[in-house]
Image (cartoon, grey):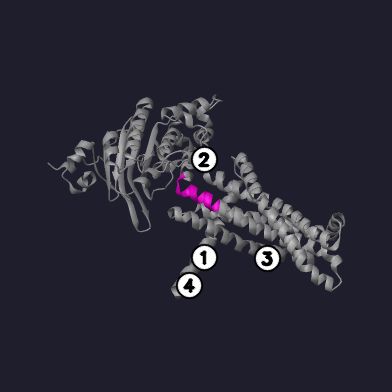
Amino acid sequence: MNVKENIAPNKNDTSTEDVVVRIQDLYKSFGDNHVLNGFNMVLRKGENLVVMGKSGSGKSVMIKCLVGLMVPDSGVVEVLGEDIANLNRVDLDELRSDIGFLFQGSALYDSMTVRENLEFPMRRHRKKFEGITDTLPLVKEALENVGLGHTMDLMPEELSGGMKRRVALARAIILKPKLILYDEPTSGLDPITAKEIIGLMRSIQKKYGTSALIITHDVDCARVISERMILLVDGINYAEGTYEELVASSDPKINAFFKK
Amino acid sequence: MAVKIINKTKDFFMEIGDLSYFAVRFFRQAVTPPFEFKELLKQSYQVGNRSLLLVATTGFIIGLVLTLQTRPTLIEFGAVSWMPNMVGISIVREVGPVITALICSGKIASGFGAELGSMRVTEQIDAMEVSGTNPFKYLVVTRILAATLMLPLLVIFGDLIALFGSSLVEFMKGNVSFTLYFNTVFDALSYGDLVPATIKSFFFGFVIGLTGCYKGYKTGRGTAGVGIAANTAVVMASLLLFVVDFVAVFVSDIFYEL
């Protein structure tokens, strides 16, 4: 039996009820470098989907197209039922209040304290917090969720790499998003801290029932967190399935990802 | 060789075009709400406060040196009583604004370039965008406006310190009182000296803010790009300052003729 056929992506999946993200025929090039060549993907409500690919395979480009940080050359990107291409700046910002984004390098604002970092998105999305005058309890709650309730007044430079990632995670969930995008959540972290971050990601999903799209090349992270995986090869979703299905594949391109 | 020259020329004009587009974007965003007043105040305080000591020190030394260097010649021609007039006019019209702007381009443009550059490579600007903030408005517009508004104040402050330095030399060497010195300076100055110099300073501030933010905001090539951004911001700002100065002097000269 050809495993690849079994786990091939279903491009014609049309049921829309519980779809959080739908990407159809996504193309993106940088000059002669064709990064995405017709990528397709569907993320369902409450699902943890991992997209794996080699460095430079276009994972980060794809995730940035999802939040409007990059404009694709062609293709459809729908997030929470909205076609990103049809949104103006105001509507896009409103949609972004339902999306949490954990950046690869944490991306905490250097000039702000941990508290200000967390308050920043709240100040921008006042509508979502109508009637709430004191943001402190929300900041506290988000920081306690990641086990860093005591760091509120520290500057990012005073935090370790793992702590920065946790604060960034707290910032990603402060708006109580429906969808969280993780761009290489464990990169640059030691195995123990990486394990802690994965644990936090799982507990957050359990607590808030969010959907998560995780971009990684960390096999251990993918194994623990994924309910479904997509392998991004040559700009397309080369294979799709559960971790176990993909590991069992005899396709050399798929095997290359899981070789120790 | 010829291809290299053509490519360099092409790059130069592309950069000018890109910078012009950046400037147009600034004007468009500066007049459309929401306005980031809090951040503008913060940046204005930072720009002014960060440069104050440097401007004061430079101004004081320039005033001292200019007077010390000119004194012997004026004594030789029996015109030492013209010292406050000469120093006052040269500092207010040209030396003060240009020196202050050059000092600030080193301090402010490189600071903006490095700060925004590092924010770009560490994805802080992307994080801001995802948080629902327009990073151009929040980071660029506020910084350019702060530099534009603060530079004239720094120039006036630098001019006063330079005149104080000059008066100190005159007090010690020529026994001229501070009151007499400053009275003579202010008698010699007219609105025709003050107004063009002040207007010019706004443009200097704009150029410093614009180039610093442009280089920082467009940073690429990782952490190495941050250093390049800071460095090229200073070079570009300094060069543009002289171009602006030339245009300003040329225009004000036309008004004098009228």
Tell me the chief SS of the magenta region. helix
Measured from the top left, where is residue A49 in percent x and y? Answer: 30, 36
> Which element is circle 2 on?
loop
What is the crowding at mark 1: few (fewer than 14 residues within 10 Å), some, or many (at least 20)? few
- Residue at image location 76% in from the left, 63% down from the top: B90
**Mark 1 vs 4, N-terminal side:** 4
Q: Are dots 4 and 2 in contact, CB under 8 Å?
A: no
**Mark 4 vs 3, N-terminal side:** 4
Question: In the image shown, does A154 or A117 lie closer to the viewer?
Answer: A154
**Mark 3 vs 1, N-terminal side:** 1
**Which mark, by number, is residue B5?**
4
In which quarter of the view is residue B250 placed?
bottom right
**Which mark, by number, is residue B246?**
3
**Mark 4 vs 2, N-terminal side:** 4
**Real-space CA distance between mark 1 and mark 4, rounded to the nearest whole angstrom:** 10 Å
**Real-space CA distance between mark 3 and mark 1, rounded to the nearest whole angstrom:** 20 Å
Amino acid type for the residue under numbered disc 2: Thr
Measured from the top left, where is residue B121 in percent x and y? Answer: 45, 49
- Determine whether, in the image, residue B174 is placed left or right of residue B149: right
